[in-house]
Structures are given as C-alpha cells and as structure tokens.
Amino acid sequence: MQLLHAPSWPHLSFQTSDRNSKGGLLSLEKCLQLSTANCSFQPQKLERSIWVSHKRNFFSFCATKATSVEAGSSAASSGTAEGDVLKALSQIIDPDFGTDIVTCGFVKDLLIDEASGEVSFRLELTTPACPIKDMFEQQANEVVARLPWVKKVAVTMSAQPAKPIFAGDLPAGLRRISNIVAVSSCKGGVGKSTVAVNLAYTLAGMGARVGVFDADVYGPSLPTMVSPENRLLEMNPEKRTIIPTDYLGVKLVSFGFAGQGRAIMRGPMVSGVIDQLLTTSEWGELDYLVIDMPPGTGDIQLTLCQVVPLTAAVIVTTPQKLAFIDVAKGVRMFSKLKVPCVAVVENMSHFDADGKRYYPFGRGSGSQVVQQFGIPHLFDLPIRPTLSASGDSGTPEVVADPQGEVAQTFQNLGVCVVQQCAKIRQQVSTAVTYDKSIKAIRIKVPDSEEEFLLHPATVRRNDHSAQSVDEWTGEQKLQYGDIPEDIEPEEIRPMGNYAVSITWPDGFSQIAPYDQLQMIERLVDVPQPTAVQS
C-alpha cells in the first residue's frame, strides 16, 4: 500500500533511541516517510508494571476453541490415570460457551506420577485478562484433588501468545496484537478519550498487555491524560520504526508526543500521518490495542477502519439527542465495515445530591442506541468532578481510585470487552471450515444461527477478483471447466470479521467475503462421510 507523506514538518521531531547518535533528534518528516511494506523488525516483549491486582468473581467468557489436549478424548474414555484427570477437569464448564475446559483445549502439559499420586498441568487461557482465571484455577485444583489416588495437585496458569485474527499481510508493528478495539463517539466533547484511556488501564490492571493509540491529530488528548516520564516518541534509527512511550506498563503513541501538540494540515496528509504512526510503531506483543478515534465519519476514520483489522468498537455518547444523531452515524459506519459494536458508554448521565439522582441532560440516548442497533451492553458514567480532574492531572481515574464507583464501572466495561472480543474471535475462527470427511466447506457466519455447506469447486468458480473477472468489461476469464470437480482447499484463514482467505492447490489465494459466500449455490445432497487419512 502506498502511503501519503506530508512534505515538511520542520518543527516536529522524535527523540532517537540511540543517545550517542549524531544529531540526537530525527525530524518528523524523516520519521514518517516510511513505507510499511519495507518496515521489518522483531517486536520487543512488553515489560509491564501493573499497579493493582484484584480477585475477580465476574462471570464471563474466556475461550476460543484451541488445540485439544493430545489424545484427550481417547484417554478420557479409557480407565487410565490420564483419563481420570481429564474426565474430572471436563466438569469445569466455561460459563459463556457452555463447553468444558478440556474440549476448549485449555489443559496443557499434563504430567502424572501414579506412584506418588502427583498431578501437574497448565491451563492456557486465550488472554491473561480472563476475569474468571482465579475461579478456573481453584476449581481445577478441587476436582482433581477429589480423585482417590491423587495426593498432590500443581496447577499453573498461562495465556496464549498474542496473535491477530487477520490473515493478510499486516504491517510489522501490528502482527503480534490479538485485539484492536476502537473507542468512538463521532462527536467531540463527550468524554471519548476519557473512556479510551480508563478502559486501557482497566484491561492492564486485569493482567493484559495493552497499548493506546491516540488517532486525533488535530487535538490529541493522550499527553494531557497520562504522565509518562519520557514525553517524546523515540525513533529506532536502524529499523526506522517508532518506539512507543510508556506509562504504568501501557504503551502509548500520540501525535502529541511527536514534539508539537496539534497538527495544522489537510485531510489526506493527516490520514497518512495516522497510518504511519500506527503501523510503524513497535507495539510488540499486545493483548489489546485501544484506539482513541477522532470525531466524525470522514476520510480519517474510514482509513483507520480499513487499514487496521479492528476486532470491535465501543461507542461513547451523552444523554442529549444531538449526541445520539452523531453516534448513530458512527454505528452505521462500523456496521458497513463489518466491525461489531460491543458496548455503549453513556457519559455524564447523572449525579447524586441530597439523596436523589438527577439527570441534567435528559435520559435515553444510550438506551436508544442499544435498542435501535442491537448493541448488547450499556454502561452509565456519572458526572463526577474527580473523573474530570483525573483527565487533566495525567493520572487516569481507575489508577487514582481503583476501588471507586467509576473504577467499578470501567471494570465491568473491561470484562465486557474481554468477553465480547473472545466471542468474536471464536465465531470468526470457526465461521468457514473445510470438512474432509464429506469434502465440503462448512459456513456459519458470525451472528447467524444458520449453518450450510458449499462445494469447494463452486466456491472457487465464484471468485470475483481481477484474475477471474475482467475489471473493465466484466467478462468472465475463469471458465467453468478450468476448475476440477474434486478440488479441495489447502488452507482457510480468517480475514478480520468479514471474509476468509482460501488457498487452493494451484497457489491461488481467494478472498471470500461472508456476504458473497451466503449468495453461492448451496449443497443440498450432502455426500456420505469418508474415512480421512491422517
């Protein structure tokens, strides 16, 4: 992808990470004139310092189907010690998906010493921010310890490495980010940045590796809301990548940390700057990257949504009708771009005084968004002087008062985001699969209860790319007879939330959007299952 470059920003600079390098500073012009196609680096592992750790008893999610325990099903059905342990662990059910932790593939490295009665294993969850990881650990200890021959149980907890659900060629800086969450309002002044920053630090407090990207170049808020020791973005002179700054273990990137507070430039330049700030930063391995979206639904917002594989969006509004009108535009934008909106935060909704609750700006904007667009969760934030003051002081409210009412609301929002992102990833990872036993492609589009089958040859013949259809004349270049009836896909990988990439034996990589797959002629006479050779 060719990126846009601003011609000159003589007063803007990054601090170079090489303290002894000549000059000491690199101009923003040089820093941003990078091609993400040529940007390669090995992301550094994020070192985190989490300021608060609580026991959490929220019911939630935490699962996408992963690789099952080796020989788990066969061992569980036998009378072996391993089968006994796995059968005991299969009593622990994930509360959201209704599936046991053995089937989910959480149980790893199972070791049994029958002579001494010692059992050890690891529970590998999909995110370190799982709200019920403590409950899983406790239950695993209890159910295995009940076995008559077990004398000692050792359970360790871990999380899967961060990895995106996007199958395409991502810029190097985004390749080790599991979930990218956009916080958007499409209207300025409603507290979107406050929600984005406090959500990020809530997720970090839950144990996740988190980054925040301030996408508002015209009015960046991040430098005011946090107080990192180093307030200049560093530049890696060898890799020509941007090193985010850090505050309390959360990685931060903002145009406000580039040496000048706000930009004065035209829209196409801004899109290029945002694109390159985001994609050439060394984010490393993150569980969640929170993007503080700029107001509006214009070119900048569309560029972000199309360049970045967004997992989900959180919508911020206020009780006024005017806020609802702008928010509705944003929800429709995300809907068209196949980005699920998972929660609505109604900020400045009320305040309490004299034992009564007052709603100075009216009621119903947040509820109206939830009802009209089917967004599953609504969270209310009160008018609170401390919340406003924390945004100006450089210390997020959830850090300043981790036990307060506002922090509790953000805790609930954080649990919701973790839960919904996990559900989305699980749905996307299993939306399109190939069943070798019946030689058919299974389709179950996210947010749909319908499952249907497609013949692989039919899918391949319905490719609409330039290699199959002439873009100018519409003439079909791929002929029916060019595709053999017995063709089988070699690999099927998700492409964000809207499509899959199918690799065929001839080396062709077909992009198949869910909408297109739903329009293809379906298999009615399902073939009989055949034995699959391992």
Image: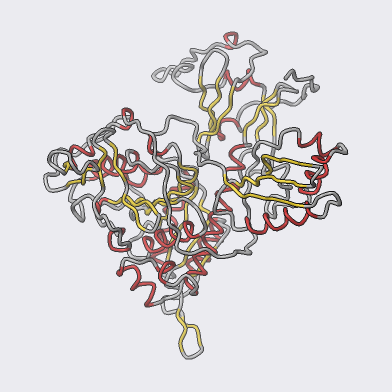
Question: Looking at the picture, how far across and down is residue 243, in whole percent?
Answer: 30, 44
Which residue is at the front of the view, 275 or 56? 56
Q: Split into 4 quadrants, where in the image is the N terminus?
A: top left
Where does the image place residue 19, in percent across and percent down from the top left? 20, 44
Q: Quadrant of residue 399?
A: bottom left
Residue visible at 38% across and 64% down in the picture = 194
Q: Quadrant of the C terminus?
A: top right
Residue 5 drawn at (x, y percent): 22, 36
Task: Name the residue at 36% across, 52% down.
Answer: 293
Q: Is residue 104 left or right of residue 192?
A: right
Left or right of 484 on screen, residue 339: left
Quarter occupied by residue 40: top left
Q: Pick the residue in front: 452 or 175.
A: 175
Q: Where does residue 216 sit, x and y in percent of width and height?
A: 30, 53
Q: Nearer the viewer, residue 514 or 427?
A: 427
**As drawn, is 330 to the left or to the right of 255?**
right
Taking the spot 46% from the left edge, 53% from the top edge, the residue there is 331
